[in-house]
Image: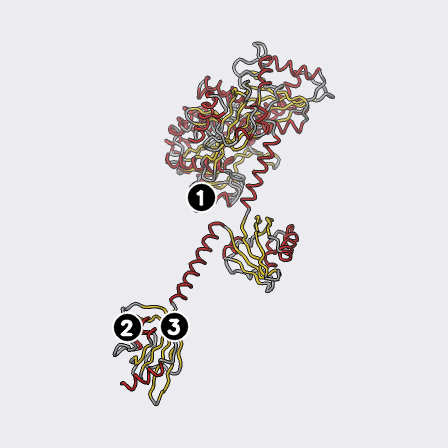
Amino acid sequence: MESLRETAAGVGVSIPGMALVAGPDGDVAFASDSALTALGMPADGEPPAGLQVSAVIPGISWPDFQGEDRIDRLDVTRADGTVFPARVTSRRIAVDGTQLAVVLIEDRIAETMAIHEAEAMRWRLDASERLTGLGTWSWDVELDRVVWSDQLFRVFGMEPGEIEPSVEQYLAFIHPGDRDEVAALIRKAAKTGLPLNHTRRAIKADGTEFTVAVEGTLVADHDGRPRQLYGVCSDATARHEAELDRARFHALMESSLDGIVAMDPDGRIRAWSRGIERIYGYTAEEVLGKTADEFLTEEEHRESRVLLERMISGESSGLTFETTRTRRDGTTVDVSIAVSPVRDARMELAGTVAVVRDISQARRFEGRMLTATSRDPLTGALNRNHFQAIVERAIEDGSAGAVFHFDLDNFKYVNDAYGYAFGDRLLRGVTRTIERECDAGCPPARLGGDEFAVLLPGIDKASALEWADRMLRQIRGYVEPVDGRPLTTTASIGICVFSADHRMTVTEIMSRADRALYEAKDRGRDSWILASADRARSGLATRMNWEERIRNALVEDLFELYLQPIISVSTREVVMHEALLRLVEGGEAIAPGAFLGVAERLGLIHEIDRNVVGKSLPLLERNPGLKLSVNVSGKSFGDGQLLAAMRDRIGQHGFDPSCLVIEVTETSAVIDTERAEAFARSLKELGCGFALDDFGTGFGSYAYLKKLPAEYLKIDGEFVSGEWSRVDELVIESMVGLAGGLGKQTIAEYVEAEETLDRLAAIGVDFAQGYHIGRPAPAVEVLGR
């Protein structure tokens, strides 16, 4: 044994580093001091007796290996049982006929820690790039080798490593209109060493356009030759749009004659326009960063604080009011202030924007004009006599212009439902709404009841129509709260445009505007009609013609039913059809909007409703499983003949009455809630269903839903069709939640795209109909007979 140890020692001492020498049976005969120390053993030159190589390095198969073996990653076991990573090289040799094994151990602890740290560093870099949206890149100019980080691939809409990056590949993602300019910037940076900075249009892998921002710098060698460009890249679309929005807002502030002031949620002023400087007398430098109480009087500040608190609490979504403010020099100014909240992506209040208008001159004008003989005492608007005198003066002066005759839609039912005090408040609010769209010298007039008129001198037909469109939107957007709910209203407008070349009398102008208004009511309300000489002559004749055509259609049986499918949003299966009336004359199918208004005024609507229901019942009898939703007018609430006919038919033929759903508009139900409730309960007794159509467009209060046993609420198409706003989505969500809480189901109308259907499904709407699902078609075609 001593001879083996001596031989092993003779070999081992000549080997640098950590070395083990073992005999043929695998016993360690020699171990260097560094090896013993690494193995946690005393470094006295002698390995412990009976120590096997396989016990120290389990990864070596002893004594089976032959020749030389190298393993880059093995765990070496210390005396205390712990391990450390090492690179192990083993070799068999023969010395004086004795077979020995030499094992060299290289400690890899530091190397392994460095690898782990590098991996952790890469992970942290990737995580930070994901959070910031910044991708990193480098370009070895001499080798023309480009490296992208994983996040940079994601910026361009790709998975990491999906393509081989290059300068040409980057340029391919740049918008064709900006590509040459960006290529020139890259060449310039590589040649001159100047920083590379650009923000340009780009196109993602899926074809969507966005804004890309690139920043880079150059590394040169000791001779100044460019060696490497490196930098960051990000999707700057949101930042770019925000900068544009700020620029637009700044331009608006600078150019507006009105004053504009923006504040943060704490009431500190963040923007102060030149217009507001002219009104208050304070410069932007004097007020920016300050709160309003630092220059408003105590009473003015208290008023402003109440408004801000209402918006913070969500009680108000914007206010318009008139008040008095104190200037810097101590004088006062009459102002109109419109305050709107600014909300972030989470709908939390991020600040407010106020538009302030100096109305001192208008107030002085009103003070001179406001007399008992010229003003309406309720609204402060001009009265009829004074308005006609103003129009007369415009005609005598040879002016051109336009007269607008307004009438609020269904206003008499507001008084019936909520009382005259509320109706008066609504009239005053509408008057203020109209005034905001009028010049100070042309205030609106109240002709009586809920009728208003406006003269706009010096405008042509195109401008008059634009103004009417804007006025309808403003009235539609005006909200008056009642019983804790917002009430909205609409108006119909008749327009008469006159010129200096074709002079008309005041009577002719007012008469034409009045007839145009009447026709706008006939066409469904919330619209305008432009008067013309031909229209004025034909208005009465048209109404008389419709009476004859309706009566003839009833006698000759010219009314037909068209069916439109209604599907379950969750399954996309047809579960019901809406029965729609058409008047067929000469092969043309005329929708009811053209004649129902006339039919209601002439008292023919009952016969039409009976005709519709009378045609629907045989379809249910002949088609088991068919379910129909049939529209009737609110005038039929008290029609005992209609209910009696339905009762008799159901009793005689025995079809399932639940397959018949009677549909009425929400507005008609709210107008006469008691009769609507009695009518709905009669339908329920017959076993029929009841639906509220155009839900969400009525007079605000949901309280009547507790009384009406409606199984279905049909969401008005105004909230469904076209591009959705956040308001539309919130309204639909509230309707779905309300319906679910009351045990009712919802039907969305005017669904025109698959995307709309998907969004309705996500909100929880039950059923849907619209042109995307199916257009109305004759019942005989839909049912095949």
Q: Which residue is mark 3?
A: 106
How many numbered tags mark residues here? Answer: 3
In x, y percent, where is residue 91? 38, 81
Question: Circle 1 sits on which residue?
Answer: 761
Foreground pick, 116 / 679: 116
Q: Earlier in the sequence, mark 1 or mark 2?
A: 2
- Dot 1 amino acid type: Ala
Residue 191 drawn at (x, y percent) = 64, 57
CA–CA distance in space, label 3 to label 1: 65 Å
Give the left or right position of residue 619, taking residue 75 as reference.
right
Query: Which of the numbered marks, if any, corresponds to residue 42?
Result: 2
Marked residue nearer the N-terminal end (3 or 1): 3
Q: How is the image coloured?
A: secondary structure
Q: Secondary structure at mark 1?
A: helix
Q: CA distance from mark 2 to mark 3?
A: 19 Å
Q: Are marks 2 and 3 in contact (CB under 8 Å)?
A: no
Across and down, in percent, residue 264 comes to 48, 33
